[in-house]
Image: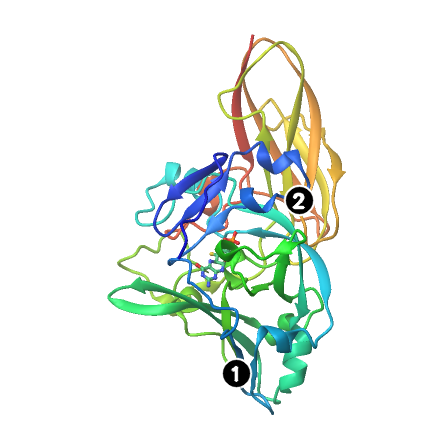
Amino acid sequence: MAAIEIHPRLRVRQESPLNAEPEPAVLVESFRTPNELFFVRNHGDVPAVDPESYRLTVDGLVESPLSLSLEDLQRFSRVTVGATLQCAGNRRRELIEVLPIPGELPWASEAISNAEWSGVPLREVLAAAGPQAGARHAAFLGLDETERHGHRFQFGGSVPLEKAMHPEVLLADTMNGSPLPPVHGGPLRVVVPGYIGARSVKWISRITLQENPSDNYFQAKAYRLFPPSVTPDSVDWETGMMLGESPVNSVICSPEPGARLPAGPVTVRGWAMAGGGREIARVDVSADGGRIWTTAELESRDSGWTWCVWAAALDLPPGEHEILCRAFDSAAQTQPAHPAQVWNFKGYANNAWHRVRVAIS
Ligand code: MTE
């Protein structure tokens, strides 16, 4: 496998396997994140995939199992969907400040990016296989291998069949108009808009329709949400909530933490994202701990499958300030004030108010 080129504006959180997130400012410089700056989340090494011999298997509770080459996939119609992917572990660093979370990546708040994906609607491929009456979940398996507790296995996960049959879910071979880069799952990945990034399985090799969710480690154990009292020693994996739709979230990307700014109006910019296809209804910014809020302008947005980029102007006197943001989605759901309110031992789904300290001189 050729070495992966890492853009200097990507902050590497782990070299092998490669895990990296862009500088905060990158995320608000353009609505779509350029491919070379899109965050990277890998649990194993990027597999070398030969496009000639590549086959996608569709099996399980289907009338006609399929084995499709990349050329076979050209027979289906094509669709383009704007979708933001966010790792369930985004903003884990703030949870780690509450209590340590050993063995998990300390993502800051940039394990999220937005792209336009093109490919084949998943529902067309599933319809060609013919789901049987008992099929309830679509289980995905990637070609990459990882190791946990002495076992080597391929990355996988599942979504309810009902979601898999929605028109926005696709098998993508194109990202922002270019062939899907290998590090993002090329030649083919699943994109499940509105769900945690883990369900958008890269290097997809097999789709199995089944009665129950996937028993893959990354569905059965990881990417589950546990109460704050549960620890690695006391965990009963069965009892955790499988993560699917993401919670509403927002983050300040500019100014960055620790910025020293001249007195006068300060433009605060960031992203906000609602899960499950809901839209962002409002973003508020405060510089006094949340007593007075300024409503931000929603600058660019596409649909409920993408984030929106927002901006607000604040007049700040000289001194130290903490700027906060919070978003409301179209179901009037909003964010909790403190990461301690959502702490969990795997460090998922932190959507607390985002806080950035700056100095005005
Ligand atoms: N698919 C495979 N095969 N292997 C992986 O490690 N990581 C998942 C998902 N799909 C992963 C995968 C996770 S946790 C996330 S957040 C997204 O891919 C990240 O996609 P990206 O690297 O294109 O940003």
Query: 327 and 268: which one is in front?
Result: 268
Q: Residue 286: x percent and y percent?
A: 63, 26
Mark 1 vs mark 2: in front: 2
Question: Tag 2, which secondary structure?
Answer: loop
In the rendered view, tell whether residue 304 sits above or below residue 220: above
Q: Which of the numbered marks, if any, corresponds to residue 32?
A: 2
Image position of 257 (left or right of 123): left
Q: Residue 108: x percent and y percent?
A: 46, 38
First in residue order: circle 1 vs circle 2: 2
Query: 325 and 73: which one is in front?
Result: 73
Q: Which of the numbered marks, if any, corresponds to residue 83?
A: none
Q: Tell which residue pokes out farthest to the left in this image.
A: 150
The residue at 50%/73% (across/down) is 54
Residue receiving disc 1:
211
How many marks on residues?
A: 2
Quarter of the image for residue 215 reads bottom left
Q: Tell which residue pokes out farthest to the front in this image.
A: 52
The residue at 29%/56% (across/down) is 232
Q: Are marks 1 and 2 in contact (CB under 8 Å)?
A: no
Q: Residues within 10 Å of mark 1 (few under 14, many from 20)?
A: some
In the rendered view, tell whether residue 205 sits above or below residue 21: below
Q: Residues within 10 Å of mark 2 (few under 14, many from 20)?
A: some
Q: Amino acid at mark 2?
A: Arg
Q: Amino acid at mark 1?
A: Glu
Mark 2 sits near ligand 1, with its Cβ under 8 Å away: no
Query: 336 and 55: which one is in front?
Result: 55
In the rendered view, tell whether residue 247 sits above or below residue 353: below
